[in-house]
Image (cartoon, coloured by chain):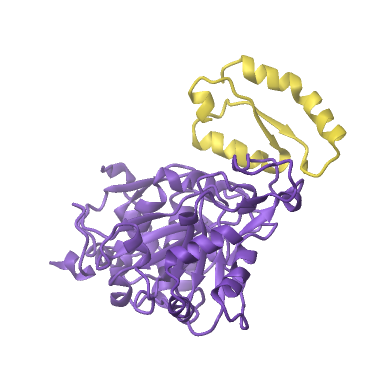
Amino acid sequence: MSDSDNRAKLVELGQSPYAIYEYFVEKGWTDGLPIIPPTEDLIVDMLRYTDRERDEVIADIPPNGGAATVEKIAINAVMAGCRPEYLPVIIAAIEAVVVPEYNLYGRQTTTHPGAHLVIVHGPIRNELDINCRQNVFGQGWRANATIGRAVRLIMTNIGGGIPGITDMATHGHPGKYSYCIGEDEEGSPWPAFHADRGFDASTSAVTVYCAESPHNVNDLVSKTPQRYLGSAASTMSHLGANGPYRGLMESEQMLVITAESAQWLHGHDWDKDDVQGFLYDNAQNRVGDLRDRGGWGHMPMPDFVDMENDDDLSPIVPLPENILIVVAGGHGRHMQAVLSSSYTMSITKPIALKDGTPIQSVQDFLK
Amino acid sequence: MTFERSQIPTSTIITEAFATYGHKLTELQSMEKLPIIVLPHPIAARPEDEVRAFAQAASEDVINALLHAS
């Protein structure tokens, strides 16, 4: 698709960085933080890292249906502080969020605190220096900080997700500024997340998952996988979460564990599907504890749950494979429950040339 | 809005805290004429008899929205 009417307009501003920032704030084009002015030379420099036309529309972003052209994606990426070579990751993320199962319209406008977590897989993590380990959800890595921020700016500036007007999040969360991690594939004893979804491990890919803020699970003491993951199951199924009341819906919930923990579990002969199965079986609640609170009655419970029996148990997702396991983080026993609203499914897309061929390196775009 | 576009009679009911949001979305979708019935806010934790009273008061508008295309 292309639409020359979608071309961005050139605005002449002065040389003062502060005045330019004020102008962008006044226009509602920032997340509140300063931006890099998207000058023509910076945009052209970034566009070297795509083989698509400048005015090609990658997606229409709800709620206002704004056309996310390659140019406008690049503009927002420049504003976010991205290096030019991050552009292919952001384009793949935008292709992913508009897949219908992701339910972007609902996620952009809901009261629920969901942010677009971008998880980067494959060799591109190392090429772009995307943090997969210590402080993985935190500050300090340019690639993580600016890729996640670029996606948010696109949601606001192109999609029209304006806080308090169309973005009706009751509280939101800090990940709505930026939310991007890499998977620690080198540290993990298990197949990479995107490999589980049918991609070659050597393919670089992006997963988007609309999620609440990470909720820490700190278990320093447990000596068995059952005890350790039991702590995670408890956090994933807390009574204020969405999952316990929406176990019938096609939905997912995520646990992020470190390579250390994954290796320890693997040493006990636990594979990823064992972890998923255990969490599915144990992240469950008594009907009597769910009754008349939280999201009770908004959605039907699974058919196999006896709603009249207070002691019957209800799961947080329909199937064990709907428990997503991602290996990331540094040293220590902490885990992160990264929960969703249940009204969304994660989507994985390869980072590819326009013809669909997965790239080997971002340098492929310069050939 | 999707239902209305599909010619399924629809009555859109929101609370006043979401009125700006509702009108903005109809504007973005070029459906400014879609009737939006606005109830007081908040509503979730009110006693049932109060909620029923709100519903009763809005019933005529709901019927009109269902019977007349926007």
In front of the other: A335 or A350: A335
Residue B46 appears at what percent x and percent y?
Answer: 83, 41
**A68 sits to left or right of A138:** left
In front of the other: A204 or B68: A204
In front of the other: A177 or A29: A177
- Residue at 51 percent across and 19 percent down: it is B7
Tell me the purple chain. Answer: A
Figure quadrant of residue A37: bottom left
In front of the other: A65 or A27: A65
Toward the left, the furthest residue is: A367
Residue A350 appears at what percent x and percent y?
Answer: 29, 58
Tell me the yellow chain. Answer: B
Residue A85, above or below A356: below
**A303 sits to left or right of A27:** right
Figure quadrant of residue A90: bottom left
- Residue at 58 percent across and 48 percent down: it is A247
Q: Is residue A13 visible?
A: yes
Toward the top, the furthest residue is: B67
Looking at the rendering, in which quadrant would you find the N terminus of chain A? top left
- Residue at 19 percent across and 64 percent down: it is A365
- Residue at 35 percent across and 52 percent down: it is A95
Looking at the rendering, in which quadrant would you find the C terminus of chain A? bottom left
Figure quadrant of residue B8: top right
Residue A244, above or below A234: above
Residue A212 appears at what percent x and percent y?
Answer: 57, 60
Residue A131 appears at what percent x and percent y?
Answer: 41, 77
